Image: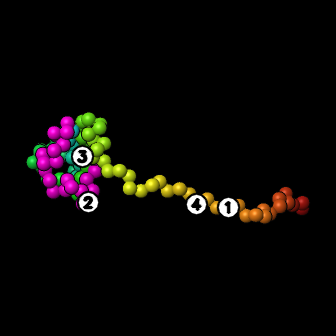
Amino acid sequence: MYIPDGSKFVGTSIQDTKLREQDINVLTLYRGAKTIPNPKPERALEAKDKLLCFGKLESMRELVPAKTRRRRRPDIADLPAHLPEDTGPEDA
């Protein structure tokens, strides 16, 4: 789970996120180049932290925001009304 800037979890401790009460265990905290296995519940979360969690899939899905952007679709152009004729290979 990625903690972006402006998340409600920024500045709160792992214990205050109430993840444990939703049967979600934080196994590892990734902060920049540091890896913190079994982080203490008192550790405060910062923006751009990544959490490796284990728990109920339905509980974790509720934490992921809905996609805000649609998938980009290619622009489809109409073919010209008159296509050039194929003259074939030129004779030398």
Question: Is residue 12 shown in magenta?
Answer: yes
Q: Amino acid at mark 1?
A: Asp
Residue 56: where, in percent of width, then height?
A: 26, 35
Residue 80: where, in percent of width, then height?
A: 73, 64
- Vertical side of 19 occupied by 9: above or below: below
Whole-Å distance between the Cαs marked 4 and 3? 38 Å
Circle 4 is placed at which residue position? Answer: 75
Earlier-in-chain disc, 4 versus 2: 2
Whole-Å distance between the Cαs marked 1 and 3? 47 Å
Q: Which residues are magenta?
A: 1-23
Magenta part mainly helix, strand or loop? loop
Which label sits in the foreground, 4 or 3?
4
- Vertical side of 1 occupied by 85: above or below: below
Whole-Å distance between the Cαs marked 4 and 2? 33 Å
Quarter of the picture containing the C terminus is: bottom right
View extreme (left): residue = 42
Circle 3 is placed at which residue position? Answer: 51
Q: Secondary structure at mark 3?
A: strand
Circle 2 is placed at which residue position? Answer: 5
Is residue 11 shown left or right of residue 60? Answer: left
The answer to which quarter of the image holds residue 76 is bottom right
Q: Amino acid at mark 4?
A: Asp
Question: Is residue 62 shown in magenta?
Answer: no
Whole-Å distance between the Cαs marked 2 and 1? 42 Å
Circle 1 is placed at which residue position? Answer: 78
Q: Secondary structure at mark 1?
A: loop
Mark 3, other Cα within 10 Å: few <14 / some 14–19 / many ≥20:
many
